[in-house]
Image (tube, rainbow, N blue to C red):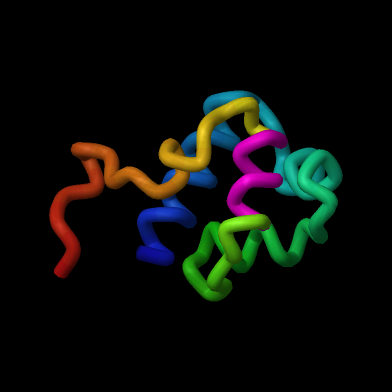
Amino acid sequence: MNSTIGGNLRHLRRRTGRTQAEVAKRAGASQAWICRIETGDANPTLASLRRIARALDVEVVDLLQRRPEQGRPT
C-alpha cells in the first residue's frame, strides 16, 4: 500500500508541476516527510493524506487507488 500511495503522490505532484517542498508547505508537513512517503518509507495517517490531497487539489482516493500502469502487487 505504501508504494501505491508514494507512487500516486509522486505522479500527482509532478502532474501538477509542484515540488516536494511546495506540497509540504501547502500540507503543513516537511519536505523530508513528503519524500519518505513517495519512497514508501513512511506510513501517512488518514489526516496526513487529507492534507496532502488538499495540497494537490485532489481527493484522498486519488492517493490510495492503484493506477492501471502500476499493475498488481507482488
Provide the major secondary structure of the magenta segment: helix
Residue sitting at the far front: 47
Residue at 59% from the left image edge and 51% from the top image edge: 49
Query: Is residue 51 highlighted in magenta?
Result: yes
- Tell me where residue 29 appears, x and y as whole percent: 80, 57
Quarter occupied by residue 30: bottom right
- Asked whether, in this view, residue 37 is left or right of residue 68, the answer is right
Query: Does 59 sit above or below residue 34?
Result: above
Image quadrant in which the C terminus is located: bottom left
Relative to the observer, which residue lies in front, 20 or 57?
A: 57
Asked if residue 31 lies in the magenta stretch, the reply is: no
**How far across and how far down the image is residue 42, in percent?**
57, 72
Image spot of residue 51 (x, y percent): 70, 46
Q: What stretch is highlighted in magenta?
A: 48-55
Q: Nearer the viewer, residue 55 or 18?
A: 55
Say which quarter of the image contains residue 2: bottom left
Horizontal side of 18 relative to 53 (left or right) equals right
